[in-house]
Image (cartoon, rainbow, N blue to C red):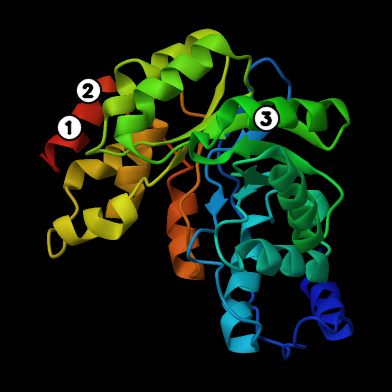
């Protein structure tokens, strides 16, 4: 969508403020990031998506939402880019749904959310509330959040998949100690996706989970690539090694992300951000050369 059309839509939507011309800064020509196929399909996802936890849990003011509109607009210049949210992330679903509606961006978005209910009645109510907040009648990926009551919730996800309410289903977690449980679920169930934590310092998934997903043809999304920001504190003040240029990295963030993307089982990473400059940097990790096994270990040694 052209920016002029986007701004007209903003002005016409009562749910959000009409931001002035120039609120969304003109972006340079967009260089696409690499894409990877969802296993067993011909659908490709850009290797860098966007998480909303924390970043999109904001209020309704122009000051709160304008930066997020700019982030979404930039991300979705590459159609099919993944945005992952959850009903447990405060106002994130509502904010995301409003911004996608305002910009007419929903068709360009691979939209993922989650269910984390403890009883079936709550799961159904949670799903209907998510659709209302996201302003959509379906999603692209629906996931059982943190393996909460996964047998019953996964059965419900399969019902919704059969009804055409979600194209793909999966399970998620964000902690190393859950990886053994994730392995058992992937072994016992037919899944399209898993979402897990994985970073240059949290490599538990490499032992069994990532190889199993590759063997079973399960797409893998990665959260907590920066360990909630702690990795940046670890390298603060240190210069980027000159050899980072060998894999086209211009920042520490790109080096961390390319470590993750260098694993052959990974489909996409979904770092959360509310800042356009951080999104631009993250997208840079999806371009150029990726590290081989030797280069990935060289990256890991920097954080040992």
Residue position marked by numbered label 1 in the rendering? 298
The answer to whether marks 1 and 2 mark residues whose Cβ atoms lie closer than 8 Å is yes
Residue 250 visible, this orientation? no
Mark 1 crowd level (few <14, some 14–19, many ≥20, 10 Å Cα): some
Q: How far is mark 1 from mark 3, CA to CA?
A: 35 Å
Q: Secondary structure at mark 2?
A: helix
Closer to us: mark 2 or mark 3? Answer: 3
Give residue 103's position: percent from left, percent from top.
79, 68
Left or right of 234 on screen, residue 179: right
Q: Secondary structure at mark 3?
A: strand
Residue 195 visible, this orientation? yes
* Residue at figure coordinates x 34%, y 39% from the top left: 175
Q: How far is mark 1 from mark 2, CA to CA?
A: 6 Å
* Residue at figure coordinates x 84%, y 38% from the top left: 165
State the residue in front, 262 or 193.
Answer: 193
Which residue ends up furthest to the bottom in the rendered image?
Answer: 20
Kindly indicate the quadrant of the structure image that contains residue 244: top left
Give residue 290's position: percent from left, percent from top.
39, 32
Q: Secondary structure at mark 1?
A: helix
State the residue in front, 201 or 290.
Answer: 201
State the residue in front, 22 or 218.
Answer: 218
Q: Quadrant of the C terminus?
A: top left
Mark 3 crowd level (few <14, some 14–19, many ≥20, 10 Å Cα): many
Badge number at residue 169: 3
- The vertical placement of 58 against 96, above or below, is below
């Amino acid at each position: 969508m052209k920016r002029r059309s986007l701004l007209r839509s903003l002005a016409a939507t009562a749910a959000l403020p009409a931001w002035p011309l120039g609120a969304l800064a003109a972006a340079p020509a967009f260089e696409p990031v690499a894409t990877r196929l969802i296993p067993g399909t011909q659908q490709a996802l850009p290797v860098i998506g966007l998480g909303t936890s924390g970043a999109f849990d904001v209020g309704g003011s122009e000051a709160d939402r304008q930066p997020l509109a700019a982030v979404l607009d930039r991300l979705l210049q590459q159609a099919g880019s993944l945005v992952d949210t959850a009903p447990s992330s405060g106002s994130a679903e509502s904010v995301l749904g409003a911004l996608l509606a305002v910009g007419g961006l929903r068709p360009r978005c691979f939209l993922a959310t989650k269910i984390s209910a403890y009883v079936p009645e709550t799961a159904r109510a949670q799903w209907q509330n998510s659709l209302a907040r996201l302003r959509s009648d379906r999603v692209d990926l629906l996931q059982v959040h943190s393996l909460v009551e996964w047998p019953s919730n996964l059965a419900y996800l399969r019902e919704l998949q059969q009804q055409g309410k979600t194209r793909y289903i999966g399970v998620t977690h964000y902690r190393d100690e859950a990886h053994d449980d994730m392995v058992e679920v992937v072994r016992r169930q037919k899944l399209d996706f898993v979402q897990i934590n994985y970073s240059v310092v949290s490599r538990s998934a490499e032992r069994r989970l990532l190889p199993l997903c590759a063997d079973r043809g399960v797409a893998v999304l990665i959260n907590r690539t920066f360990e909630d920001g702690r990795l940046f504190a670890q390298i603060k003040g240190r210069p980027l090694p000159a050899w980072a240029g060998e894999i086209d990295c211009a920042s520490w963030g790109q080096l961390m992300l390319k470590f993750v993307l260098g694993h052959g089982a990974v489909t996409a990473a979904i770092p959360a951000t509310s800042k356009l400059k951080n999104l631009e940097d993250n997208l840079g990790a999806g371009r150029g050369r990726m590290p081989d096994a030797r280069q990935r270990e060289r990256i890991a040694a920097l954080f040992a």
